[in-house]
Amino acid sequence: MAAAKGDGAVGELELQAAIGFNGHVPCGLICHPDKEHILYPLGCTVVIQHLDTQKQSFLHGHTNNVSCVAVSRDGTYVASGQVTCIGFKADIILWDFPKQELLARLSLHEGKVEGLSFSPRGIYLVSLGGQDDGRVMVWDVSKREAVCGSPASPRSAGNANVVVCSSCRDEMFVTAGNFTIRVWELDTATKKIHPSECYAGQLKRIAMCVQVTNDDDDFYLGTTSGDVLKVNTSSKVVTACGPQKKFSMGVTALLLLKTGGLIVGTGEGTVALCTGSDFQVKKRMRVEGGVTSLTCRGRDDQFFIGTNKCQMYRSAYATFKEELVAVCHTEAVNDIVFPAGHSDLFVTCSTNDIRVWYTPERWERLRITVPNVTCQAVEVTRDGMVILSAWNDGKIRAFVPATGEPMYEINNAHNLGVTAIAATSDCKQIISGGGDGQALRKKTNDPRQHVVQMRVLPSWRVPDNHQWNRQKDCVLGSARWLCNQRSARLSVEFHQRDGHHVRRGVLCHRW
């Protein structure tokens, strides 16, 4: 962080790159029509990444997590919606893609923006509100204002989950969801939208994704039941349903090919190529996590897959083989540390795993998985020979940095989970803090022994450790705990300012 010249002001850090992808957003991974960029949500930001150079740029403006993203057919506009607290307006932001600038905020939906879709010529933007809103709105893109709106589903049905515009007509779009399928027509003269219910006979389905054919004759719906419905746009009747053997965990994403085939993504991670009126499966592959996005690059030569395990895959239509192109944590990142003297590698920890990353390429080099537990802090010893980790099951685990193999573990280190960990500069001792308010010291040359010393702290969660240059002192977070490692005793001091007085308490126990 550099200071501005002259006035001594502190400048802002420039974001150079981000490792992450919110794979929980339906249809959140989108290839831009220029065939050179890909867009996806990450927290409150929309990331634009060049496919060849991997250079990233960021669209900042949302105040909460991005819930949906859409790109106009010509690539000029990008729209993104967000979630917010119940009772508050959820913004839709309209962006200029070439300039990467914010054009307008459109705020009428409450709670969440469920879906967005541009009309074929980019004249209108259609938005779908979440469960607490339940409305579908049509926006005039050039005027940046709402044209009209209506409840998205009838009272007898459930909530609409998805909205998709027509491929040829600016005045038509489709919504679908819990036992509801509707085709909408916009009357530009009266500025009203009129729905037409689609007839599905005895079929009762919850739609999760929709794709409209290029000629607007039909559209396809993926359902939670694991099948695909084909609906005729003119007659509003379901004309086909398949395959006979349904997909496990529902059809969560669809991609129509120019050749007439249909690529299906499922909740169990299967990606299948289906053809014919009976949706017969011709090819299939398997990815990690449920598929949430399918997007094509160009004309039927390559497509990308996004999963709810926050991973991206690339595949060619001809080979139909998956290639992993991006990975990240699936839950919150709890700690991050650079090894001493190295900036090309860093270590992160989260739920179920520890990962080692290569900084220049932003790529994962090593993953250490421990199922059903959360790593709350991580440390690399100064000699780089051990990765120390603190876990919410009360254990301290050590791993080999090169291979990820377990070295040893200390059981029952803290009753309420280990929340902080550090190693002395000579790599011979470990200091740990726990949710029980205790700070412990252990010798690394005999890690399975009992704790050498213990200081009972107040019932506060001890934050992450930040070690000083010398092993004489160790600072545990912002609470100003000082551990003076002298002779055979561990002395832990707590300084608390009470008005003009400072109180100090020390208590040591030996096991």
Image (cartoon, rainbow, N blue to C red):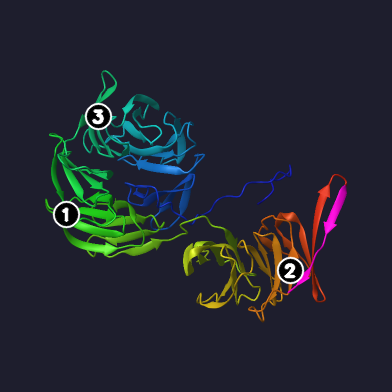
Q: CA distance from mark 1 to mark 3?
A: 32 Å
Question: Residue visible at 28% across and 22% down?
Answer: 192
For the question of whether residue 361 can be seen, the reply is no
Q: Of residues 195 and 263, which is closer to you in this image? A: 195
Q: Of residues 53 and 378, which is closer to you in this image? A: 378
Q: Magenta includes 14?
A: no
Q: CA distance from mark 1 to mark 2?
A: 64 Å
Q: Amino acid at mark 1?
A: Pro
Question: Residue visible at 85% across and 44% down?
Answer: 499
Q: Which disc number belongs to residue 243? A: 1
Task: Quarter of the image for the C terminus: give it.
Answer: bottom right
Secondary element at image label 2 = strand
Q: Of residues 180 and 319, which is closer to you in this image? A: 180
The image shows residue 497 at horizontal and vertical percentages of 82, 49
State if disc 3 and disc 2 touch (CB < 8 Å).
no
Q: Which disc number belongs to residue 323? A: none
Q: Name the residue tied to disc 2.
A: 454
Sequence-wise first label, 1 or 2: 1
- The number of numbered discs placed on residues in the rendered structure image is 3
Quarter of the image holding residue 456? bottom right
Residue farthest to the bottom?
445
Decide: few, some or many residues near mark 2? Use Cα within 10 Å; few <14, some 14-19, many ≥20.
many
Secondary element at image label 3 = loop
Quarter of the image holding residue 347? bottom right
Q: Amino acid at mark 2?
A: Met
- Up the image or down, 272 lies above or below 490; here it is above
The image shows residue 76 at horizontal and vertical percentages of 36, 39
Magenta part of the chain: 501-511
For the question of whether residue 21 can be seen, the reply is yes
Quarter of the image holding residue 409? bottom right
